[in-house]
Image (tube, rainbow, N blue to C red):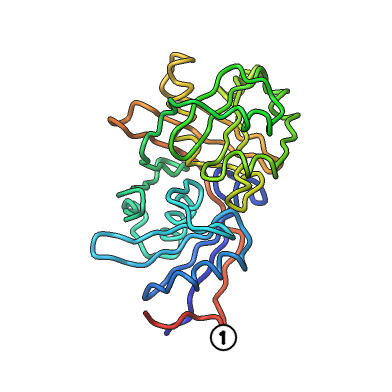
Amino acid sequence: MSPLRLIQIDAFTAVPFAGNPAAVCLLDPPADDGWLQALAADMNLAETAFLWRRDDGFALRWFTPTVEVPLCGHATLASAHALWEEGLLRSDGPARFATASGALRAWRAGDWIGLDFPARPPGGPVPASVCAALAVAPVASASNPTCHVVEVESAAALRALRPDLRALALASPDRGVAVTSRDESGAYDFVSRFFAPAHGIDEDPVTGAAHCALGPYWAPKLGRTDLRAYQASPRGGVVRVVTDAAPDRVHLFGHAVTVLRGTLTGATLPRRL
């Protein structure tokens, strides 16, 4: 087996050491699940993405340090960026991915990278235990099968939030929690933070998949379908969300910066399936 390339990329940022870091591992051939999870645990990033070539593009899977997840925006953006930078795709061609969330697509839009993702508008109730763990009195709240959305009164309240992460993991064992508010500064349409302690991620720096819910949540409230968002984690990152690009889809846009390239040593290479 040839040495495997491993690339670390900061996604949803135009500058290094901000946004959300993802590791991208280029596989040939694919490896077993135990090896994938072990490498993701060793990388200890919010997500490690694993790619291998198919006739119709690339297969793509995402792992946190503890579990595989069905959808990840920042690691998909990082994967497309890696394929273009490594010369595995034409610079003017799209990246096509087969994933657990269906077919996904990425493309270059000037200096941005666009992502075509499923829209996941929230509509169900949020358990009271989730808001109790957040220690907030929500303005409004709604859920979809993968994410609770909790709106708070201001960006200042959002930034001051200090959730009980252990209680939040118990209250939401199967979903992440996106806390959000309007942005009073006018620089952005809305701001958010995202917590998923049950999945090994106390606070995610920038969460593309959460914006599949946040975009459809805010578009009718704001009367706009092209939204500029900021995730107010300590690293911070910018996501542009377009909610009317196609039925049941959202388009997410972000930047990416490569910060590290390497190869896995012989002792760490997976056995062939």
- Up the image or down, 212 lies above or below 80; here it is above
40, 137: nearer the viewer: 137
Point out the image quarter for the N terminus. bottom left
Point out the image quarter for the C terminus. bottom left
Say which residue appears at 52% left-offset and 42% top-offset.
Answer: 175
Q: Residues within 10 Å of mark 1 (few under 14, many from 20)?
A: few
Say which residue label 1 marks: 267
- Residue extending furthest toward the left: 55
**Residue type at numbered disc 1:** Ala
x and y, in percent, of residue 84 in the image = 41, 58
In this rendering, position of residue 85 left or right of residue 200: left
Say which residue appears at 63% left-offset and 31% top-offset.
Answer: 129
Quadrant hosting residue 231 = top right
x and y, in percent, of residue 265 in the image = 57, 82
x and y, in percent, of residue 143 in the image = 48, 30
Quadrant hosting residue 232 = top right
